[in-house]
Amino acid sequence: MPTATVAEELVVRARKGDELSTEDRRHAVGWLIVKEPELTQIEMGQMFGVSDTTIRNDIKIIKQERAKFIKGDYVELIVSDLIADYERLASELEKSRKAATLGSANYREHVMAAMKMRLMIIEALQSLGWLDKNLGEMQVTKTVYKTEVQKGGMITVRPVDMFDNFQEGETLDQKLEREARERPRLTSASETDDGQAAPTEHDQPSPIQGSTT
């Protein structure tokens, strides 16, 4: 496979008007879509002396070849090279940051660039399947508590968990509402056992007063 230096030389030749073979053109196109992504397919077609349809087909074939490469036995080598490149760039960036004045705009740009590089390497490793795509997601556990008031004033509090008696297809809110309806209503001193209000002093029939003579 031609190196990046060869690809650069091919691009220089194409810009001078030299006609390239199909293989050389595709290698140069593959280098350009990485190094100069702002170039349009029309502009690349003009550079290589072909139509934009030909460039579009070149890019499709390049992507297919890269996909075969990724699916092969070279993933470990790709990851190794990726990490080595990251460590080299991070080292160079750190040397440059040390020359910047603390708190300056240049210093902040170095810090932001370092953070961006870290995120990019994580995303690259995730896309290759070497890191979990859910890395860093927070999991929240929610616990619902239920308060029960017994006759006599005793209060108990406990979490509503899997051991509670859920009916089929019943949600937690529906279960709590059902239990509230089924729970015996507390009676006050002014209520009888059958739930009817006990007669008060004013409700008691007055004794019949006999007539006096």
Image (cartoon, rainbow, N blue to C red):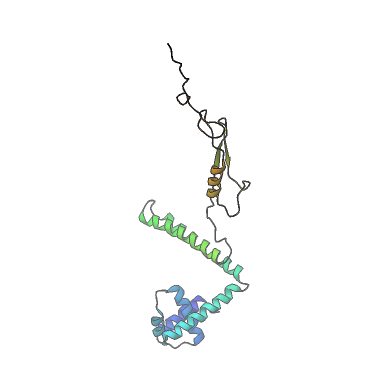
Q: How many discs appear? A: 0
Residue 14, above or below 210: below
Residue at the outermost front position: 213
Residue in the picture at 46% in, 73% down: 34
Residue in the picture at 49% in, 60% down: 119
Residue 194 position within the rendered picture, expressed as x and y whole percent measured from the top left: 56, 34
Residue 62, above or below 111: below
Q: Residue 66 is drawn in which quadrant? A: bottom right
Residue at the outermost top position: 213
Which quadrant holds the C terminus? top left
Which of these two is toward me, 211 or 108? 211
Residue 61 position within the rendered picture, expressed as x and y whole percent measured from the top left: 52, 81
Which of these two is toward me, 183 or 174? 183
Which of these two is toward me, 125 or 110? 125
Residue 82, above or below 189: below
Residue in the picture at 55% in, 63% down: 126
Which quadrant holds the N terminus? bottom right
Residue 187 position within the rendered picture, expressed as x and y whole percent measured from the top left: 53, 32
Which of these two is toward me, 112 or 202? 202
Residue 50 position within the rendered picture, expressed as x and y whole percent measured from the top left: 42, 87
